[in-house]
Amino acid sequence: MQKEISGIIIECVKGNIVDQPDMTAIVNAANAQLRPGGGVAGAIHRAAGPGLEEECRPLAPIEPGQAVITGGHNLPNKYVIHCLGPVYGVDKPEAELLASCYRQALMLAEKHGIDSIAFPSISTGFFRYPVQEAAEIAIKTVLSVIPELKQVKKIRFVLFSDSDLMIYETALSHLAGSAGPG
Ligand code: AR6
């Protein structure tokens, strides 16, 4: 599914975050230490190679809601933007912290002249954020940042399961109204 809003394409696809070769940046659902870990972070570090962990070391630790940027190393993407999502029920206020991840990632993309960025569903794996709530926050935040974007032209949500894809697509169509071809 794809929507175009103020000249910016927002889309939801099912897939693997490390298999998005047409995107300039991908976003990592990181841990505070910016170490490999599991889930998205494990997949990104495996695909990027050890140079990514080395570049990350002096940038760690990061706080919930924070984003930092590195190169993509062996990934097909020029950049990786690492976001630390909130652990549901632990890091508060969780909705604000999750929104901050998406906002800070997009602001870093702007600053680095990035035209396309792919997000995973931050915090909804090991960090246990309910996907329905997380999807609404993710889409709402992206929509609210759109008026500030000059460099970013394409924003992709990469979902790992059919059910997550459906939840993000439903949130996008509700929150973005009837804009775009759908
Ligand atoms: N591509 C796209 N989505 C994925 C992939 C992938 N390769 N792998 C998992 N997902 P998670 P979090 C989905 O746990 O909740 C790590 O250990 C997954 O199904 O990666 O923010 C870090 O080191 C879920 O829907 O991120 C941190 O300690 C979503 O991506 C911690 O987990 C996010 O799952 C971060 O936890």
Image: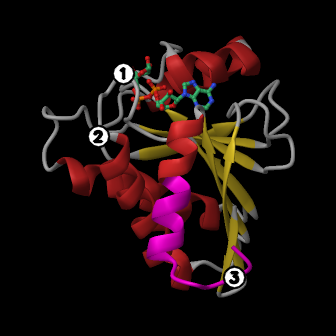
As measured in the structure, the alpha-carbon distance from the residue carrying label 1 to the one carrying label 3 is 34 Å
Label 2 element class = loop
Give whichever of 15, 41 is nearer the camera. Answer: 15
Type of amino acid at the residue the image marks with label 1: Phe
Q: Residues within 10 Å of mark 3 (few under 14, many from 20)?
A: some
Label 3 element class = loop
Q: Which residue is mark 1?
A: 126
Q: Residue at x 74, y 79 (%)?
A: 181
Residues at badges 2 and 1 in contact (C-beta under 8 Å)?
no
Q: Which residues are magenta?
A: 168-182
Whether 25 is drawn above or below 44: the answer is below
The numbered dot on residue 64 is: 2
Q: Which residue is mark 3?
A: 180
Give whichever of 47, 52 is nearer the camera. Answer: 47
Type of amino acid at the residue the image marks with label 3: Gly
Counting residues from the start of the chain, the first of labels 2 and 1 encountered is 2
Q: Residues within 10 Å of mark 2 (few under 14, many from 20)?
A: many
